[in-house]
Each structure stands twice: as C-alpha cells, then as structure tokens.
Amino acid sequence: MRPEPVYRIPFSGRAHRYTPAEVELVARVMQEADPLTQGRHLKEFEAAFAQYIGAPRCFATMNATCALELAAQLCELSPGDEVIVPAHTFTSSAYPFAKQGGALVWADCDPATRVTTAQMIADKLTPRTKVVVVAHLYGYAAEMPEIMDLARQHGLIVVEDVAQALGAEVAGTKAGTFGDLGVFSFHSHKNVTTLGEGGMLVVQDPARAALVPQLRHNGHCPYPAERANYWTPAMGDVDLPRPGLWPSNYCLGEVESALGVALLRRIDQMNAEKRARALTFIDGLRQYPELRFHRVATTRHTYHLLAAYFDEDGRPGLRDQFMERMAYDRLIKCVVQYRPLYRYPLYAKNGFGRAVCPGADDFFDHMVSFPFQHWLSADDLEYMLHSTRQVLEDLRR
Ligand SMILES: Cc1ncc(COP(=O)(O)O)c(C=O)c1O
C-alpha cells in the first residue's frame, strides 16, 4: 500500500478548537469539582440541554453509544421484535438493539438527502416491527413529522439518532424531540465535543425516564424507607423494577459536563458558520455536475459533514481517481463513509447480512466526504475549493 502523504488539509479527528474561557473553565472544574462525576455540573448540563433542545428529561452519558444502549433497553424488546434501522449510518445506531434481542431490518436512504424517509420505513414494516431508529446523518434532520405519523398509526417506538445533528430543526422543532427517545453525541468529531467523548439521552415518557438514573448508574437508588443512621445498612440501595433489567455505569464526568454547558452557548453560531461555508463551497462547484451535494440553506442542515455523490457518468472508477488526486496531488484527505451496515462481517455473522437498499449501496459506492472540521481556515476552504475544481477539470481530459 502506498504510504499516505502528509496532508495540507487532514480529515481531522477533532471538530473544533476551544476558547480561552473554555480552557480556563476546564482547568478550574478539574481542580475544584468534588465529586468529579455525578455532581452539580452533570445536572447543570442536563438542565441547559433540556432548555436548548426543548424537552425536559435529558440524561448525560459518556457517549452516544451508551445513550443508545440505554435507549435500546428502554424499548423492552422481546425475542422476534423487529427494529428498523437505516443501513446508511454509523454502526452503533444498530447493534445496541440487536444486543437486546431485536431483529434488525435495514431501511434504505433517499439518494438526495442520504437519510431514511417515512416511505422507506413503511416499506419495511411487518406485524413484528416494534422500534424505528432514524439517523439524522451528516447533520440533516430527516422528515420527522411524517415518520411520527407513521409510527403513531402502527404503535411504534421511535428512536432518533441525532449524534451528528445537534441543533438541526424541522419547522422550528429540534431533531431529537420528535421521537420517544433521542440520542446525541459530543464525540471528538461531532458538532461540539466535550473533550472527545460525551452523549445525551432525551426521554419523552416520564415512566421510561424514571428508569434512567438507575440504569445509568449501577442500579443505585435510595432505600425505600427511612434509615435510623445514614451508614446502615450501607450508603444506598441497588435495585431495578423488574428481573432481567441490568444496569451499567454511563454517567458523563463533571469536567466534560461543565464544558458542555459552555459549548451549548455557541453551538448555533458554529452551526451557522459551517452552513454558510458549506453553501459557499457547494455554490462554488455549480459548474461541476460531477459532484452532487445536498444543498439546504436552513437550520434543517447543520453540515456536520460535507458529503457529495460523485457521478461517474459511465466512467467507473472516476470517484477513486478523484480521491487519489485530491490526496496525493493536492494533499487534501477526503474519505468514504458509512458502508451499509449489512456489508460488515459483524452483522452478516449475526444473521443481519441481507438487505435490499439500493440507495445505501449506490451512495456508499460513489460518495466523497470532504474534510469539514470547524477549525479549517478561510484559506484552507478556498484552497480545497480551488483544488476540487482543478482535479475535476483534469479528470475531464
Ligand atoms: C450516527 C451516529 N450514531 C452514533 C454514534 C456514536 O457516537 P459516540 O461516539 O458518541 O458513541 C456516532 C458517532 O460516531 C454517529 O455518527
């Protein structure tokens, strides 16, 4: 294999820089917080997130995968229950539901928006369908009102995977608050990151939400009755309401939580900046129909990522030539993302290796994801735009 070059524009593993005030905050909480987990900053982050998102019951977790594990538990799956999941998404949108005994059924994605639709979900419904997972991929919010109508007609639980789309809205309502459960990520790559890892679970139903503190923290709970002394029989009880329900330890730490509060104050601004840059880039390539972008000028798209479909126009392999020239001639690292999940050995080995999702297959085989971290400079973006045009011109020859 040819060694990778030293890139001028990497596909960075970190989404954004921190402000001096955020760095000072982290250092202070690091020294002063007591305890360093499950303290006041966790509660403050959950309250600030609830306010931002417009839903009252929010629970911070170590990452979105932990939140998805909790969401899958809250669905209370029985053997044979089917869970419809988009094939075109990150792996942890899916496997937590299989771990709870769900049978995964793959939904396709719309080639124009790259997310699933109500119709694509309807195509996969059976009498065994219990849960639908919707992933707002690339930062674009799927058609939630239509999906919720379908779900209500069929009595389905809807889990929104908003890992990539914090702040995205459909008609003024934030993604993650339509479904029964919403899951967010503050991973290193995401719109905002709480030092590399972080997540949030939004739960609509109060009865389900009541289970989360114990599920999230080792089953710890108060004793049912008053104790004579605070130290007997022990610090706290350990319980959950029914057999078969087992807890984990998934709380987000205090430093990350304090930082999360600060980042929420500028998420809208960061999203707006990314959207403006995405539109400039897309519009700057109007003369190049080889690259088909998803152009959305509203808050429905946060442009967490900037992805295009490469139309090879009868010349197979052209996408890979484009990637190669961008990498080795221009030192810009584009990547290919979201192999349809049924094409991974893990899912095939577990009996979920079959699907009819032509949109997901075709998009994966033709997609190009451009580096689009928030910290790119205006010069970097200009260089990437200019380079993209040049490489496309070269490939036309
Ligand atoms: C769509 C989607 N779902 C879930 C996750 C998992 O997020 P985390 O890394 O916070 O567990 C990711 C992150 O990579 C993602 O992109």
Image (spheres, rainbow, N blue to C red):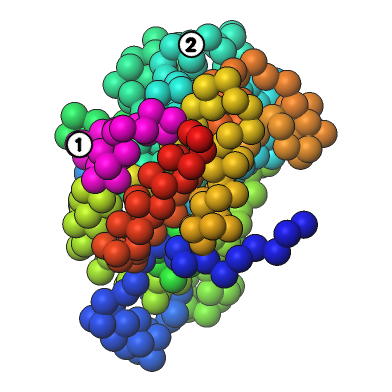
Residue assigned mark 2: 122
Mark 1 element type: loop
Q: Which residues lie in the magenta part?
A: 279-300
Residue assigned mark 1: 298
Q: Residue furthest right?
A: 349
How many other residues sit within 10 Å of disc 1, few (<14), some (14-19) or many (≥20)? some
- Give the Cα distance between marks 2 and 1: 27 Å
How many other residues sit within 10 Å of disc 2, few (<14), some (14-19) or many (≥20)? some
Q: Give whichever of 18, 205 is nearer the camera.
A: 18
Q: Is residue 108 visible?
A: no
For residue 237: magenta?
no
For residue 298: magenta?
yes
Are the residues at dot 2 and dot 1 in contact (C-beta closer than 8 Å)? Answer: no
Residue type beneath disc 2: Ala
Q: In which quarter of the image is residue 162?
A: top left
Q: Is residue 263 above or below residue 248?
A: below
Q: Is residue 207 above or below residue 110?
A: below
Q: Quadrant of residue 103?
A: top right
Residue type beneath disc 1: Thr
- Residue placed at 73% from the left, 37% from the top? 344
Mark 2 or 1 closer to N-term?
A: 2
What x and y, as percent, mark residue 211? 47, 46
On residue 19, which mark appears? none
Mark 2 element type: helix
- Residue placed at 73% from the left, 59% from the top? 2
Q: Which residue lies furthest to the bottom in this view?
A: 31
What x and y, as percent, mark residue 76? 58, 32
Which numbered disc, 2 or 1, marks the residue closer to the eye?
A: 1
Q: Is residue 328 visible?
A: yes
What x and y, as percent, mark residue 37? 45, 74
- Residue placed at 32% from the left, 74% from the top? 18
